[in-house]
Amino acid sequence: MKLHELSPARGSRKNRKRIGRGPGSGHGKTATKGHKGLLARSGGGKGPGFEGGQMPLIRRLPKFGFANPFRTEYAIVNVKSFEKWTGADTVTPQALVDAGLVKRKHLPIKILGTGELKKSLVIQAHKFSKSAEAKIQAAGGRAEVIPGV
């Protein structure tokens, strides 16, 4: 047996039903939709979530909460991440992206104060928590806020 002699088993493959392609196809004229009625119309049929007239699940469930459309989301980096820092003494947002500490590079960066810092680094970010700023300054470094949020 050769590769070009292979074929699927008989009856395992079936041609697609091509509706609305003329009388010769066997599925012309009404194109398997019958005569008139909702299902014969374009866009006809029940909408998504329709449950036969029963109150749909989406309407039965309680609604709560509020999603603020103006919320600013930050890519966060903890102070403990700088303990293994081997790059330059100045830490820029681009350097954080290159080091793999920030995955979502389109977001502004916020530094949080989890962990300890013993290195003296100049860290540039869009925002700092108070504890992060205190830890950076206690280690002899500087926290520089850059505009862009």
Image: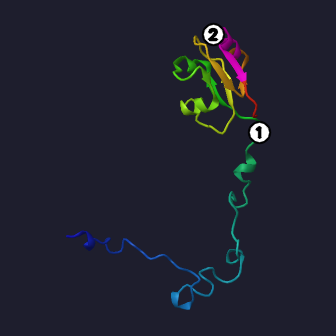
Crowd class of label 1 (few under 14; some 14 to 19; many from 20; radius 10 Å): few
Work out whether mark 2 precedes mark 1 in sequence or the reverse, and give the earlier one.
Answer: 1
Residue 74 location in percent, x, y? 69, 32
As drawn, 13 above or below 82? below
Kind of residue at disc 1: Ala
The disc label shown at residue 88, or none: none
Position of residue 88 relative to residue 116, above or below, is below
Q: Which residues are magenta?
A: 133-144
Residue at 66% x, 12% y is: 135
Q: Choose top left, top right, bottom left or bottom right for residue 110.
A: top right
Q: What x and y, as percent, mark residue 62?
A: 76, 42
Kind of residue at disc 2: Ala
Q: Residue at x 22, y 70 (%)?
A: 2
Q: Secondary structure at mark 2?
A: loop
The residue tagged 1 is: 67
Q: Secondary structure at mark 1?
A: loop
Q: Quadrant where the N terminus lies?
A: bottom left
Residue 79, quarter of picture: top right
Give the CA distance from mark 2 to mark 1: 38 Å
State yes or no: discs 2 and 1 in contact (Cβ < 8 Å).
no
Q: Quarter of the image containing the C terminus?
A: top right
